[in-house]
Amino acid sequence: MLFAPKPHSALLIVGHGSTENPDSSTPYFEHAAEIRRRGLFAEVHCCFWKEEPSMREAPYMIDAPEVYVVPDFISEGYFTQEVIPRELQLSGPTTELRGKTYHYTLPVGVHPSMTGLILRRAKEVAPEVDPAKTTLIITGHGTGLNQNSTKAIKDQVALIAASGAGYAAVTDAYMEEPPFIADWDKMAGTENVIVVPFFIADGLHSYQDIPVLLGMEEEVGAAASQREVFRHNPHHLRGKKLFYTSAIGTEPLLADVILDQVADFDKILKSL
Amino acid sequence: MSIAKKLKDLIRSGYHRMGEVEIQADVYGYAYLLCHHEDEYLSGEGGLGGLELHEGPDKARDLSTYAPDGTYRFNKAQVNLQRGWALGLQDEEELRQALDLFYPACLGLFLASREGRLDVQNLREKLERQTGMYRFAKSISDAGAQKLVRDTCGPDNACAKRILWRIDAATPLEDSPASSYSGIPDGLTETEAIPLLCREACNHFVAECRKAARAEFEVKNEVG
């Protein structure tokens, strides 16, 4: 989608961040740098829940009178519906606050264009395999606390299954609720299995926890950026060929999904 | 006037430091050159005295992510910025972006403070609005919170910012190196250095409050 520049608006990308792993916030800064490079906004900033700048500090960095707030989160849930509005003092899709107008978009992970990114990732990691002989598993955290946290993944599974991409099977799996990603081999009837972690960053979960659950590693390793050798695909495990991609949020094209959410906001919500 | 233009005026009026970062203007063909303040003498020598030269504001994140001992600087106001680098920037907009990566939002907070529009939030208000796993943090005692300020804030611990908040409106922070720190290092004045300001307790401090509150609860139950 061609994005109409907003030379009088700021873009504020909101991420989770981490006090333990700097890889967690790397994609947010990369997405911000890419959008800044394209000159589409007057300013582009990031802010975080667990890192600096905090959401309460972020407005002090911004000159522009209009601010698009995009949660660079994978699903709707506790953070996008409770924490971010509270911390940024947003009362709805559009909020007037201290002389600025804030527009609050949906999180990137729920945008339909994520489907293309997942398929692209899967193709990149296993360009030679025949989709008809391959199971595609989209994996996320999952939690019994919030049903929304798995909805974005279930939606993507349905979209890909209906897309004509040709995979023998497409399914969802989670770290902390069934179907469990640790049982990946049991849910795949094919020899080839591609696992795409539906996370923004290659942080604790996608690069440390899930490889253990998949059986690729025996114990939790160092942060991705601290590794000397990255993983090599495919992994021959449990009688199958396993292809494991980096987190979907590290895809450079996610910058386009951020812009898609801004464009959709203008199209759908600004007219309300 | 934009934040970048205000920054340009600050530098012209004699400001040259923010935290551990020294700011030089109009050197070696760059509008601004940044380095660790302890490396400033090297930056004046031929070949930048061996400092590794980088360009562009985005490099500021790489330069400030890890301390010299390899630990992750999740709090950017720690006094352990690595040395040995210089960062060349083309204009004040790049300078603004770089400073926002070295010391996130601190420039904007300082300008807001000078202009009388900085909203400071006391600790009790901050804890009251917490939800989820952090909602238990609010049960910390005043004494416990005062101890945490002494033990986790200030340049001797993990943060060289000037704390502007109180426990609550009626309860100031007890005097300590942490609570009395100016946010300006090395005896510089506020006409030379942009101070690092803390307008409300950070989420690291809230997480520490949660741990301390739990410990207080367990002690109380054991005694009871």
Image (spheres, helix red, strand yellow):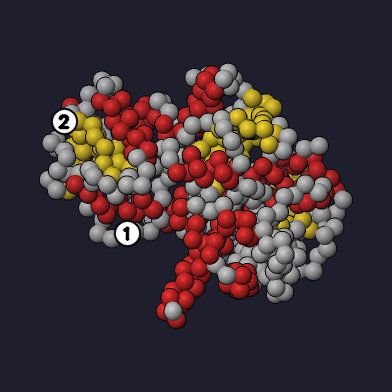
Furthest-front residue in view?
A: B224
Q: Classify residue B18 as left or right of residue A135.
A: right
**Does residue A30 appear in this view?**
no
Q: Identify the residue at horizontal 52%, vertical 62% (top origin).
A: B137
Q: How many marks?
A: 2
Disc nearest the viewer among 1 and 2 = 1
Q: Identify the residue at horizontal 54%, vertical 35% (top origin).
A: A70
The residue beneath circle 2 is A133
Residue type of the residue flagged with mark 2 = Lys
Percent from the top left, x then y, of residue A29? Answer: 54, 43
| Foreground residue among A59 and B124 | B124
Instruction: Give the chain of mark 2.
Output: A
Percent from the top left, x then y, of residue B139? Answer: 53, 65
Q: Classify residue B33 as left or right of residue A82.
A: right
Vertical placement of A92 versus B166: above or below?
A: above
Crowding near the residue tagged with mark 2, few <14, some 14–19, many ≥20 C-alpha atoms within 10 Å: some
Percent from the top left, x then y, of residue A242? Answer: 22, 42
Q: Identify the residue at horizontal 52%, vertical 45% (top origin).
A: A83
Instruction: Tell me, yes or no, whether the two marked residues, 1 and 2, touch with CB atoms within 8 Å.
Output: no
| Foreground residue among A52 and A120 | A52
Percent from the top left, x then y, of residue B196? Answer: 71, 58
> In what quadrant of the picture does the C terminus of chain A appear?
top right
| Foreground residue among A103 and A205 | A103
Q: Identify the residue at horizontal 72%, vertical 38% (top origin).
A: A98
Vertical placement of B171 versus A235: above or below?
A: below
The residue beneath circle 1 is A220
Instruction: Give the chain of mark 1.
Output: A
Residue type of the residue flagged with mark 1 = Val
Crowding near the residue tagged with mark 1, few <14, some 14–19, many ≥20 C-alpha atoms within 10 Å: some
